[in-house]
Amino acid sequence: MTATLMVQGTTSDAGKSTLVTALCRWLKRQGVSVVPFKPQNMALNSAVTADGGEIGRAQAVQAQAAGLAPHTDMNPVLLKPNSDTGAQVIIQGRAIGNMHAVAYHDYKQTARAAVLESHQRLSAQYPVVMVEGAGSPAEINLRAGDIANMGFAEAVDCPVILIADIDKGGVFAHLVGTLELLSASEQARVQGFVINRFRGDLSLLQPGLDWLEQRTGKPVLGVLPYLMDFHLEAEDAVATRQVTQAGPQLKVVVPVLPRISNHTDFDPLRLHPQVDLQFIGPGQAIPPADLIILPGSKSVRADLAFLREQGWAVVIDRHLRYGGKLLGICGGLQMLGTQIDDPHGLEGAPGSSAGLGLLDFATVLEPEKQLRNVQGRLCLEQAVVSGYEIHAGVSTGAGLNGAVQLDDGRPDGGMSADGQVLGTYLHGLFESSEACGALLRWAGLREVQTVDYHALRERDIERLADLVEAHLDTGKLRELCGL
């Protein structure tokens, strides 16, 4: 018999993704076959699955924790915002089109069917389904037709753990207030609380925990400590914490575009001790740097216009005149070309935009999205690289001379004749130690320290499972997982 357990949070970024990751690895350690699941996700960080679809990046990390290859059923509804009021809707890994928020609200019944179908398939294959909610279950305006939180829990009749972040402040108000705003049947589903990111002496918190249990009649399943030097790929918010140490530092700048996507590309650079990575936001000047990276974008033409409005295009030209390096990834690659055409209005009103003209090629946005996990070799040092493609654009032109030669025989991206500008469709290229080293040397770092990004991620997943063992009520968790 399959057990489904759901983790919901009092707020966004309360620690839902982290706790689900921790529980998946904790169960895997015990030989339990567990699968992660998120009914609905709103994020611009995504991953390509083994079955050739697209899911939220957090679910791909949770799959790693469970020892599984990512699959589209793990995140059947993915919403990728392309404006303040609209998003691309992806159902079971496939984009079905763009919808305004109001239109999607009406579409939820169809999305709900996909969610329940995916959950049913996973339930037939795995004894434990570990579910992550989205945002907060107490968002009153979103309760009708909810498929992300209690609406899903009620539909599949599963217990819920409620997690809150004490580092934000107001943790008791968050937990009690959330519970108060739930219906009686939903309140009954909440089997306990987890408090996340606690610093200090637990004995000073204990009176509050006793009050909380007395006030709500629900147990506190544990208090997770604040982890220093911890990294788990962000679901959406741009993470800026980085590791630094004395010695030569390569200065890298990433302009944060309004619809920046897959900024997890830069996590290996944030964690590299020889890289000083800066994210530059609206109204900020791009400082002197060795390397500027144009990131992926969900709305390439609008983000290119924003880049020009900020005066960043002028700074990029000056950067190149003084010998700096420029890298474009996915949408950033498309910006490097001569023109971007959107004849179908996939990312806004139909039309064309002039590119930066730094590489000789043009891009046409087509409805069929390209989704691939790929491997190949960089033109730099013939370094082995692996990554993934997620893009709607089809790029053609002489400037696409193969920055990467893919193992499937296709050339990807291009490099300028002077060697200063490089563009590729590959996300995740810095995750390969060999490719990361080659790119950092190209950008000007002479002696590059090798950092195994995958080992760092695996280390931190293991640390999370250790926290479950040390700080949570594992007996109650086993009971909730039907063990």
Image (cartoon, rainbow, N blue to C red):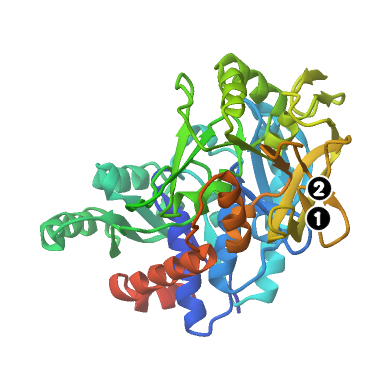
Quadrant in which residue 11 is drawn: top left
- Observer-nearest of 450 and 394: 450
Distance between the alpha carbons at the discs numbered 1 and 2:
6 Å
| Residue 483 in view | no
Total marks shown come to 2
Residue 358 lies, in percent from the top left, at 73, 28
Q: Residues within 10 Å of mark 1 (few under 14, many from 20)?
A: many
The residue located at (82%, 62%) in the rendering is 407
Q: Which mark is residue 86?
A: none
Label 2 sits on a secondary structure element that is: loop
Quadrant in which residue 195 is drawn: bottom left
| Residue 390 in view | yes
According to the image, label 2 marks what residue?
A: 402
- Check the image and report above or below for 277 versus 356: below
- Check the image and report above or below for 54 versus 146: below
Q: Which mark is residue 405?
A: 1
- Check the image and report above or below for 475 versus 136: below
Do the CB atoms of the residues marked 1 and 2 lie less than 8 Å apart? yes
Residue 365 lies, in percent from the top left, at 83, 32
